Image (cartoon, rainbow, N blue to C red):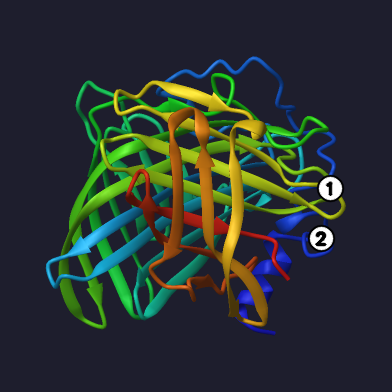
Amino acid sequence: MSVRALVLCFVLPGMAAAQGYAGLGREAEGFAPVTPPAVLAFPRDHGPHPGFRIEWWYLTANLRGSDGQDYGAQWTLFRQALAPGPEGEGWSSPVAWMGHAAVTSADRQRSAETFARGGIGQAGVAIAPFRAWIDDWTMMGGSGPGDALADLRLAAHGADFAYELHATADLPPVPEGAGGYSVKSDAGQASYYYSQPFYRIAGTLTLDGRGVAVTGEGWLDREWSSQPLGPDQLGWDWFALHLEGGAKVMLYAMRSRDAAPFVTGTWIGADGRATPLAGDAIRLAPRGWTETEGRRLPTEWHVEIPDFGLAVDTEPLNAQSWMAVAYPYWEGPIRVRGSHPGLGYLEMTGYR
């Protein structure tokens, strides 16, 4: 048995056969429910949420290198409670942590994955000062008087890449959905969800031992839930768009076996004001497909939001942006063309 398989058997028992992508559609008996209204509070909600089954700290960055090339970078920390009840200390803690990191270029996707057991200090999140970590991958907050996520330093590495990035934002985090209460299905599955989409990024990528200075834009998602998918939902297509002029857009389509996708999103003005978008306000359709790892995925999309005059097409920087991790998915930077040019990120899960 490989070390990775051993870790999966130890920290993620029973997940492979669970419902929905990565078991996120399983019943959540004993875990804290997600109910309206959301009452977001900072810095409290930058930290972990004991009682809920799953949450993540998820940053993506669209970057331009000093070599004239475009890149994408990802830093993600997942917290997973394997059973309800007190989190505890030491090896008896029922909490597992998983980290994903990636650097995408036009010709290559580089990714890495790491695991940790909760309760032993190998991974975690602290609020004051803000620090998220797993092994030596870190997301460190500044020590100033402002929001703890307004000034971040990130570091991660894999076998053939590393990065150190500095992310700063002038505007506060943005609630997704109804003030942070984000519905995922007609049956009422939901999460608490906010974003920081206004990062300016600067730093260095190291690829095969070669350093490249980069600058760009970043987007951080914070989300926690106990059952974010309905039992019949297979996965999602998620978009985070940085548009010329400063507006931002978050969209997702939750795909089901036998029903139309559940679509929703948020239009975020350049001033940070968020306008929730119902499914009938969004037109989202694939327009180009890619074969990757034995799967056929919609890597090019057409997106319309008529109320804001948006009609754009997206295309990937690298159509083979496959994350070959324990629960594999597609994640990579995209270009946006049409009424509102820009850049962004696309994530697609649950394709078989």
Return the x and y of residue 144 as percentages of the image width and height.
19, 26
In terms of image quadrants, where is residue 108? Answer: bottom left
Lateral position of residue 13 relative to residue 113, left or right: right
Lateral position of residue 75 relative to residue 351, left or right: left
Task: Please give the name of the residue rendered at 80% of the width and 33% of the height, measured from the top-left corner.
Answer: 186
In this rendering, is residue 223 above or below 210?
above
Residue kind at label 1, given as amino acid type: Ala
Task: Please give the name of the residue rendered at 38% of the width and 54% of the height, measured from the top-left corner.
Answer: 336
Front label number (1 vs 2): 1
In terms of image quadrants, where is residue 206? Answer: bottom left
Q: Quadrant of the N terminus?
A: bottom right
Task: Please give the name of the residue rendered at 73% of the width and 28% of the height, measured from the top-left corner.
Answer: 32
Task: Please give the name of the residue rendered at 26% of the width and 83% of the height, measured from the top-left corner.
Answer: 208
In this rendering, is residue 207 above or below 333?
below
| Residue under label 2 | 14
Specify which label sits upstream in the sequence, 1 or 2: 2
Q: Can residue 329 be seen here?
A: no
